[in-house]
């Protein structure tokens, strides 16, 4: 599996949104990571459907939405016309994950679940691993960009890769939080094939995002 990089829009200069999206359009094989927060599941509030409807008119990349929200069922319905490629919800936010995954799969090409750092892999039933297209391992506490990478997430990726391999599954393993040119190699070696990076990419000197993305790759 090749590695997908998904720059997180959370760290973009929102006053320059259109120009920044066009700048990312010059780079191939990216996803665009969209952190939707509701100020309830996490103590932060970002953007919703009206903003993402504009983003999709400019970005050529697959839209990868990470819903840090208390009621993901509401968002599945509400965002169905935004053109998302991947819809990831938090395991900790749902009581009926099987039904939710079925709903997502009926409306979006890819369904993902995300685990907070404190949620062990053992909390997830086999049936869920079999249903999802993507598993997002959080390597920071969700809510904010620019936090320090938690190195223990590397072992979680190794264990998840084993579950994937032993059960002949092919979900993507995505990691999100504090990713940079130094820790990315360890994550890829551990089995991750989809890496989110916000502050590292958008903090590139002279807006040379490609050089930072290449360091991760
Ligand atoms: O989900 C997120 C925060 O909850 C963001 O995707 C993540 O933090 C990206 O930012 P950075 O790479 O700066 O850590
Ligand atoms: Co995210």
Image (cartoon, rainbow, N blue to C red):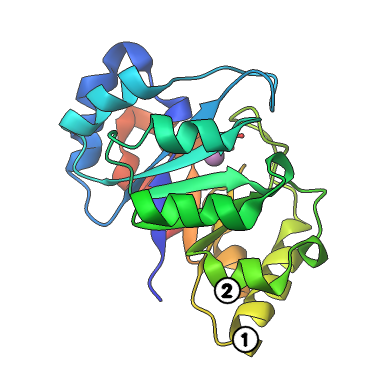
Locate residue 112 relative to residue 1 in the image: left or right: right
Label pair 1/2, CB-CB below 8 angstroms: yes
Rendering coords of residue 214 (x, y %)? 36, 55
Rendering coords of residue 7 (x, y %)? 41, 42
Rendering coords of residue 143 (x, y %)? 65, 28
The disc label shown at residue 1, or none: none
Secondary element at tag 2: helix
205 relative to 91, above or below = above
Q: Is residue 206 visible?
A: yes
Rendering coords of residue 18 (x, y %)? 21, 22
> Of discs 1 and 2, which sits in the foreground?
2
Identify which residue is drawn at 58% across, 30% down: 145
Q: Residue 189 occupies which quadrant of the picture? A: bottom right
Q: Quadrant of ligand 1?
A: top right
212 relative to 13, above or below = below
Q: Nearer the viewer, residue 96 or 198?
A: 96
Identify which residue is drawn at 45% across, 46% down: 87
The quarter of the image holding the C terminus is bottom left
According to the image, label 2 marks what residue?
130
Q: Nearer the viewer, residue 105 or 116?
A: 105
**Label 2: few (<14), some (14–19) or many (≥20) C-alpha neighbours in 10 Å:** some
According to the image, label 1 marks what residue?
167
Q: CA distance from mark 1 to mark 2?
A: 9 Å
Secondary element at tag 1: loop
41 relative to 184, above or below = above
Q: Is residue 192 visible?
A: no
């Amino acid at each position: 599996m090749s590695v997908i990089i998904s720059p997180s829009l959370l760290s973009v200069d929102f006053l320059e949104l259109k120009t920044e999206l066009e700048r990312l359009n010059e780079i191939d094989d990216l996803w665009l990571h969209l952190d939707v927060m509701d100020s309830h599941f996490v103590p932060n509030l970002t953007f919703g459907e009206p903003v993402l409807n504009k983003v999709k008119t400019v970005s050529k990349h697959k839209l990868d939405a990470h819903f840090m929200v208390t009621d993901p069922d509401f968002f599945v319905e509400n965002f169905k016309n935004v053109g998302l490629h991947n819809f990831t919800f938090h395991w900790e936010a749902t009581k009926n994950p099987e039904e939710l995954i079925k709903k997502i799969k009926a409306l979006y090409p890819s369904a993902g679940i995300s685990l907070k750092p404190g949620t062990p892999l053992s909390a997830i039933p086999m049936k869920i691993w079999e249903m999802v297209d993507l598993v997002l391992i959080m390597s920071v506490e969700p809510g904010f960009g620019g936090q320090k990478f938690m190195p223990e997430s590397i072992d979680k990726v190794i264990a998840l890769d084993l579950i994937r391999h032993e059960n002949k599954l092919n979900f993507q393993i995505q990691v999100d939080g504090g990713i940079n040119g130094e820790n990315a190699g360890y994550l890829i070696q551990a089995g991750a094939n989809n890496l989110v990076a916000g502050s590292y990419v958008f903090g590139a000197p002279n807006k040379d995002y490609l050089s930072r993305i290449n360091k991760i790759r």
